[in-house]
Amino acid sequence: GVPVLCAVLYASGVSEAFSVAYVAAVGAALADTAESEVGQLSRRPPRLLTSLRKVPPGTDGAVSLPGTLAGVAAAALAAWLGLVLGLVAGPAGALLVALAGFFGTVADSLIGARLPRLGNEATNVLCTLAAATLALIPALFIE
């Protein structure tokens, strides 16, 4: 998937910025999973991100407050781990990765709501690709 591609590009010496993209992609995948799992436990019905109407749990593109908070926490955890492991440089880099990881899940929800026929696998690839891209572009300019 996207994280593997980023890791290979980083390891091959193409650019140090691919380490940031890697962590953001993994963060998005972790955040997406956390949002789904915690969101299922919410007592309130989720809302479709595109219209904010209430929908049944498990609906593609649906979000809940507990799930969203879990996603933010998971993206922040991935960013912190990237910082500790030396894959992300400094607090600004960690913030970039956390934001990119979270916004990858926003992309996931938007894609799920608008294009449910794509399926979960394709949506997950696009989620991690969005996060990696959101982190990579600024990281290339900082490098």
Image: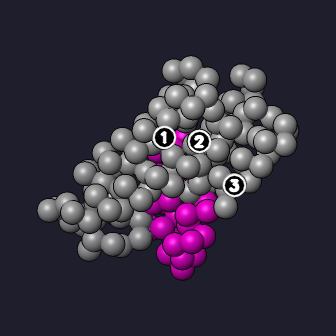
Occupied quadrant, residue 45: bottom left
Residue ID for mark 2: 23
The kind of residue on which mark 2 rests is Val
Callout 1: few (<14), some (14-19), or many (20+) C-alpha neighbours within 10 Å? Answer: many
Q: Does 84 appear above or below 90?
A: below
Q: Does 95 appear above or below 104?
A: above
State yes or no: residue 105 in magenta.
yes
Residue ID for mark 1: 78
In primary-sequence order, the first of circles 3 and 1 is: 3
**For the view shown, which residue lies furthest in the left direction?**
43
Numbered disc 1: secondary structure: helix
Q: Position of residue 72 (x, y in %)?
A: 38, 42
Residue ID for mark 3: 4
Numbered disc 2: secondary structure: helix
Magenta range: 100-126
Q: Position of residue 14 (x, y in %)?
A: 85, 38
- In front: 49, or 133? 133
